[in-house]
Amino acid sequence: MQKVYDAEGKDVKVDAYDFGMVDEVGDSVDVILLAPQIGWAFDQTKAAYPNTKVILLTMQQFGSMDGQVLVDALKEEGID
């Protein structure tokens, strides 16, 4: 994802964290992407971070291992 944003000239910082760290970073990020394996945590994450966009990736998106696919998914959610 970072390479895609860099190639587009966007000032975006992409970081990946273990879900166990969401309480440490959740309030300081604009978007939280959740892997499909932890889809069970979607509702609780949305409730805990009402000012942060929370997106649950599909298995196809996550499994693609393609940053462009994820950036496109964010664009579909209105995040550019």
Image: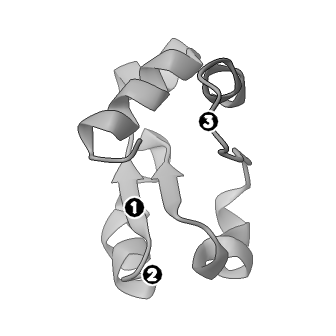
On screen, 65 above or below 30?
A: above
**Label drawn at residue 49:** 2
Residue 9, percent across and down? 65, 28
Residue nearest the observer in this picture, 27 or 48: 27
Q: Is residue 80 left or right of residue 77?
A: right
- Residue 2: percent from left, percent from top: 70, 31
SS class, disc 3: loop
Does residue 7 show up?
Answer: yes
Residue situated furthest front in the rendering: 9
The mark nearer the N terminus, 3 or 1, is 3
Q: Nearer the viewer, residue 77 or 37?
A: 77
Q: Which residue is mark 1?
A: 54
Q: Residue at x 70, y 73 (%)?
A: 25
Q: Which residue is mark 3?
A: 10
Q: Which of 77 and 65 lies nearest the eye of the viewer?
A: 77
Measure how far apart labels 3 and 2 are at the Cα level: 25 Å
Secondary structure found at label 2? loop
Within 10 Å of disc 2 (Cα), the crowding (few <14, some 14-19, many 20+) is some
User: Horizontally, is 53 left or right of 33 in the view?
Assistant: left
| Spatial CA span between label 3 and label 1 | 21 Å
- As measured in the structure, the alpha-carbon distance from the residue carrying label 2 to the one carrying label 1 is 8 Å
Q: Position of residue 19 (x, y in %)?
A: 64, 61
Q: Is residue 46 above or below residue 73?
A: below
